[in-house]
Image (cartoon, rainbow, N blue to C red):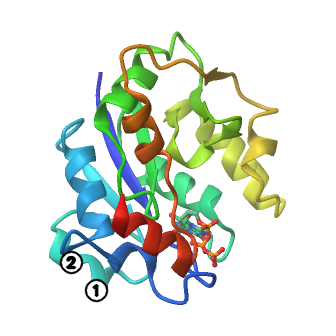
Amino acid sequence: MRICGVILSGGQSSRMGATKSFLEIDGRPAIAHIADELKRLSDRVAVITNEPADYQFLELDLYPDRYRNKGPLAGIETAIYHMDADVYAFAACDMPFIHYGIYEHLIQSLNHHDAVIPMYDERVHPLSGIYTKNVLPYIQMLLDSDQRKIRTLFDHITVNYVTSYNGISKHTLDKHFFNMNDPEQYEMAKRL
Ligand SMILES: Nc1nc2c(ncn2[C@@H]2O[C@H](COP(=O)(O)OP(=O)(O)OP(=O)(O)O)[C@@H](O)[C@H]2O)c(=O)[nH]1
């Protein structure tokens, strides 16, 4: 199975007030930690960013959103449009502690669905999901009619929502799904 890892980094970071990808965790930018983990899944990892010059140090494939200012769904569209793979493992740039084993578990849960979306602590995490190429025309249809909600995509495709993570510790899961959106959460991240 051909897998691509994709980091979504096209947001405004307005709550944080600084680009979340470049916030330092253990002396390295958050996005470098995320890239390292996705490289354990695949030798093909891309970043979807509208400021590619800032990301060249990562030495990854860089693509700007094809649909501008339409949110993360546009980032997913861009990745699938440009890269040829069977499955795409997505990560938000504000989840610095992702664990590749959780993605392996999601991929094993594909079972002919169009996407596998993790749930944890009663929250749905669509930007840490696995998507197949099948979703591309549906995303384009939504973006073409200015619909940006990922949840709307799920009305059109088959989704396996994963809620059990046998063999993965609570500590690993708590960190994987930790998301830093504001300065307070960044301070928490530095202590994790
Ligand atoms: N490629 C791409 N990624 C996006 C876009 N909007 C948000 N993202 C990414 O989606 C993830 C979640 O973003 P949010 O936290 O909802 O939004 P944000 O713009 O980063 O932050 P706020 O401005 O504080 O809402 C992050 O990884 C963002 O970089 C977009 O328009 N394009």
Q: Residue furthest front?
A: 191
Q: Quadrant of the N terminus?
A: top left
The type of residue carrying mark 1 is Ala
Element under label 2? helix
Q: Is residue 6 left or right of residue 153?
A: left
Where is mark 1, residue-wise?
A: 53
Which of 145 and 125 lies nearest the eye of the viewer? 125
The residue drawn where x is 40% and y is 84% is 51
Q: Residue furthest bottom?
A: 17
The residue drawn where x is 52% and y is 35% is 131
Residue 124 point in image, percent of width and height: 67, 39
Indicate whether 183 appears above or below 82. Answer: below
Which of 148 and 142 lies nearest the eye of the viewer? 148
The residue drawn where x is 24% and y is 46% is 37
Q: Mark 2 and 1 residues: CB-CB less than 8 Å, in contact? A: yes
Q: Is residue 137 left or right of residue 108?
A: right
The residue drawn where x is 56% and y is 53% is 77
Which of 65 and 38 lies nearest the eye of the viewer? 38
Residue 168 point in image, percent of width and height: 37, 23
The image shows a total of numbered marks equal to 2
Q: Residues within 10 Å of mark 2 (few under 14, many from 20)?
A: few
Q: Is residue 25 left or right of residue 158?
A: left
- Check residue 56 in the rendering and tell me which mark sits there, or answer none: 2
Indicate whether 12 appears above or below 150. Answer: below
Q: Is residue 188 left or right of residue 61?
A: right
Q: Is residue 28 visible?
A: yes
How much space separates mark 2 and mark 1, taking CA atoms? 6 Å
> Quadrant of the rendered structure where residue 60 is?
bottom left
Q: Residues within 10 Å of mark 1 (few under 14, many from 20)?
A: few
Residue 105 point in image, percent of width and height: 40, 21
Q: Is residue 9 visible?
A: no
Indicate whether 8 appears above or below 164. Answer: below
